[in-house]
Image (cartoon, rainbow, N blue to C red):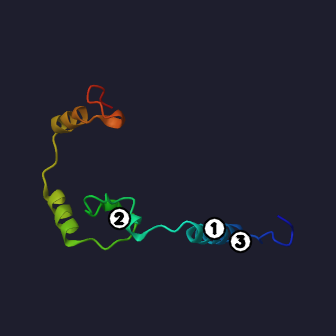
């Protein structure tokens, strides 16, 4: 970068953001994506059920079904240590192998 194009103090992040937006626009023009393939990464296309990540991180409005499920979870009794241990042993972990619990 030459001195004439060097951003001033505190402007570097803004400059990077502008460049990334310009690049996204340029790539979008070159490689358009059909609308049917656009979806939230936290929603499984086959279910379409709203997830907690969408509400908290993506600032989506919670659906009535989501709020009902959340209320049911809050009203449920806590799990015992034995049940938590059983679930941990039954879960396969990262390798999906229940013989080697995490």
Q: Which residue is mark 1?
A: 23
Q: Residue furthest right?
A: 3
- Mark 3 or 1: in front is 1
* Residues at marks 2 and 1, CA–CA distance in whole angstroms: 26 Å
Q: Quadrant of the N terminus?
A: bottom right
Q: Is residue 29 left or right of residue 12?
A: left
Relative to 88, say whether 46 is above or below. below
Which of the 4 image quadrants contains residue 80? top left
The quadrant of the picture occupied by the C terminus is top left
Q: Nearer the viewer, residue 94 or 82?
A: 94
Q: Which mark is residue 11?
A: 3
Q: Earlier in the sequence, mark 3 or mark 2?
A: 3
SS for callout 3: loop
Mark 1 crowd level (few <14, some 14–19, many ≥20, 10 Å Cα)? few
Q: Position of residue 89 (x, y in %)?
A: 24, 31
Q: CA distance from mark 3 to mark 1?
A: 18 Å
Q: Residue at x 80, y 69 (%)?
A: 6
Which of disc 1 and disc 2 is earlier in sequence? 1
Residues under numbered marks 2 and 1 in contact, where contact means CB atoms less than 8 Å apart: no
Instruction: Give whichever of discs 3 and 1 has the lower sequence position.
Output: 3
At x 27%, y 63%, the residue is 48
Q: Position of residue 92 (x, y in %)?
A: 28, 34
* Residue denoted by label 2: 54
């Amino acid at each position: 970068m030459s001195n004439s194009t060097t951003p001033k103090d505190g402007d570097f992040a803004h400059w990077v953001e502008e460049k990334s937006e310009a690049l996204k626009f340029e790539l979008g023009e070159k490689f358009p994506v059909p609308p049917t393939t656009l979806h939230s990464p936290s929603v499984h296309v086959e279910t379409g059920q709203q997830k907690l990540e969408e509400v908290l991180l993506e600032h989506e409005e919670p659906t009535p079904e989501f709020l009902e499920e959340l209320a049911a979870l809050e009203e449920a009794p806590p799990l015992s240590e034995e049940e938590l241990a059983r679930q941990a042993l039954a879960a396969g972990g990262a390798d999906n192998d229940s013989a080697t619990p995490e």
